Image (cartoon, grey):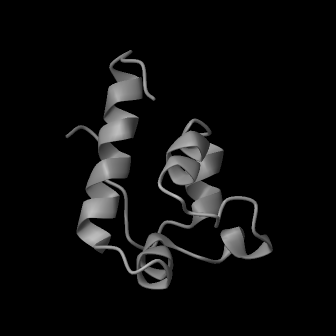
Amino acid sequence: MGINISESSTIKELLDQHPYLLHTFVGLGLMCVGCPADAFHNLSDVAREYNLDKSKLMAHLEKVIDDVTAGKTIR
């Protein structure tokens, strides 16, 4: 993978840097997007809140970012 995100990356930081992740978050059923706490909640918080495997969540987001960077269409 070309990019590594941190478990301490906030949702706001990720969306500011990679706005297309909005569709990924919504597609995963993560309603943290647009929440007033998105500036404070990080990936570790999201994984805990939604009972997700943090490593798998981060790997999925990194893959989406890599795919977009490589010019692949995301869905």
Q: Position of residue 64 (x, y in %)?
A: 37, 38
**Residue 18 seen by the camera:** no
Picture coordinates of residue 14 (x, y %)? 55, 53
Residue at horizontal 39 percent and vertical 81 percent from the top? 51
Asked where in the image residue 74 lies, by quadrant, the reply is: top left
Q: How many marks?
A: 0
Can residue 34 be seen from the camera position used here? Answer: yes
Residue at image position (59%, 76%) is: 41
x and y percentages locating residue 71 in the rendered image: 38, 15
Extreme residue toward the top, this view: 71
Residue drawn 39% across the image and 25% down it: 69
- In which quadrant of the rendered image does the C terminus lie? top left
Name the residue at the left extreme: 1
Q: Nearer the viewer, residue 66 or 50?
A: 50
Residue at the limit of the structure toward the right, as seen here: 36
Q: Position of residue 12 (x, y in %)?
A: 65, 59
Quadrant hosting residue 18 = top right
Q: Which quadrant would the N terminus be assigned to in this image?
A: top left
Residue 42 as seen in the image, left or right of residue 54: right
Q: Is residue 28 above or below residue 53?
A: above
When the figure is inspected, residue 1 is found, relative to residue 46, above or below; the finding is: above
Give the vertical position of 32 relative to 73 (above or below).
below
Of residues 26 and 69, the one nearer the viewer is 26
Q: Nearer the viewer, residue 5 or 27?
A: 27
Q: Going 69% across and 69% down the picture, which residue do you hit?
A: 39
52 shown above or below 19: below
- Report the side of 46 relative to 15 (left or right): left
